[in-house]
């Protein structure tokens, strides 16, 4: 147990935990995006899939708790690494500028905060239904189809997917850095993979809102 605490307290340990917990969420968003695409097939297909995910309360809550813990560890490591970064660079106090963080790191932090707030909104919108005008616990297709009649909703989801694209790009790239895959030979494939993930996942997610808004499905 002590070694685990020591690991968590070290900055390398926090970087590894950020990478691992980030990867957990990357796997989740790939699965979530693929599931959402079933809406293009038929309302029954996505509703059946959603019902399947809720077959067992134990499994559902194990996944939910796992995702929540991964998110808490991810954010906590980020906050502590940022604090470490700031205290170890006194130059920041001499001149109020952004010397302590690269533009990519700043985008990650503020984009991450935005995504976190959006995620709270998203769960209240589509999971609990508190922010949905016509929510059904069993008809997921109805929930998305009502929501994305509105251009404002489509735009707000599109903004979140742009933030997700930036976060995924730098996150996947950093994951390789943490794993030590930073040799010049792997620089190109690493950028390609980060770019592919950063484009394919948000575009996949946005297919359904746009298809509903333009009347292709719904
Ligand atoms: C256009 C983009 C997205 C759409 C249309 C969408 C749609 C949905 C819908 C309909 C649900 C409820 C599913 C159900 O009750 O079975 C849901 C749940 C959820 N979504 Fe999304 N989603 C999008 C993007 C995302 C992204 C990018 C993330 C993560 C960063 C995310 C995280 C979640 C989570 C955590 C849940 C709750 C899952 C649970 O029941 O525990 N979603 N989403």
Image (cartoon, helix red, strand yellow):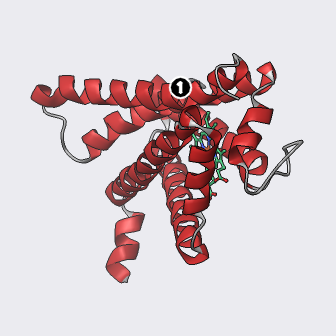
Residue at 70% from the left image edge and 47% from the top image edge: 140
Residue at 18% from the left image edge and 40% from the top image edge: 181
Residue at 42% from the left image edge and 54% from the top image edge: 24
In depth, the one of 5 and 87 nearer the eye is 5
Q: What residue is disc 1 on?
A: 98
Tell which residue pokes out farthest to the right in this image.
133
Compared across the picture, whether 160 is left or right of 194 comes to: right
**For residue 76, which quarter of the picture?**
bottom right
Label 1 element class = loop
Q: Is residue 31 above or below residue 146?
A: below
Tell which residue pokes out farthest to the top in this image.
214
**For residue 211, which quarter of the picture?**
top right
**For residue 53, which quarter of the picture?**
bottom right
Q: Is residue 202 above or below residue 11?
A: above
Quarter that holds the N terminus: bottom left
Compared across the picture, whether 165 is left or right of 124 comes to: left
Question: In the rendering, at what x and y percent does residue 9 appear?
Answer: 41, 65
């Amino acid at each position: 147990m002590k070694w685990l605490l020591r690991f968590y307290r070290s900055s390398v340990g926090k970087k590894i935990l950020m990478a691992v917990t980030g990867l957990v969420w990357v796997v989740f968003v790939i699965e979530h995006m693929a599931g959402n695409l079933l809406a293009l097939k038929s309302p029954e297909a996505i509703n059946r899939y959603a019902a399947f995910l809720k077959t067992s309360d134990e499994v559902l809550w194990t996944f939910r708790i796992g995702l929540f813990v991964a998110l808490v560890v991810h954010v906590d490591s980020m906050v502590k690494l940022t604090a470490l970064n700031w205290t170890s660079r006194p130059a920041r106090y001499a001149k109020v500028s952004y010397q302590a963080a690269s533009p990519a790191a700043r985008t990650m932090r503020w984009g991450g905060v935005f995504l976190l707030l959006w995620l709270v909104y998203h769960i209240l919108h589509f999971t609990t239904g508190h922010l949905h005008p016509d929510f059904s616990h069993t008809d997921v297709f109805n929930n998305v189809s009502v929501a994305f009649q509105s251009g404002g909703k489509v735009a707000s989801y599109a903004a979140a997917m742009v933030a997700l694209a930036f976060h995924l790009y730098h996150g996947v790239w950093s994951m390789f850095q943490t794993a030590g895959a930073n040799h010049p030979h792997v620089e190109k494939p690493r950028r390609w993979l980060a770019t592919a993930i950063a484009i394919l996942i948000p575009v996949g997610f946005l297919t359904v809102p746009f298809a509903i808004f333009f009347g292709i499905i719904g």
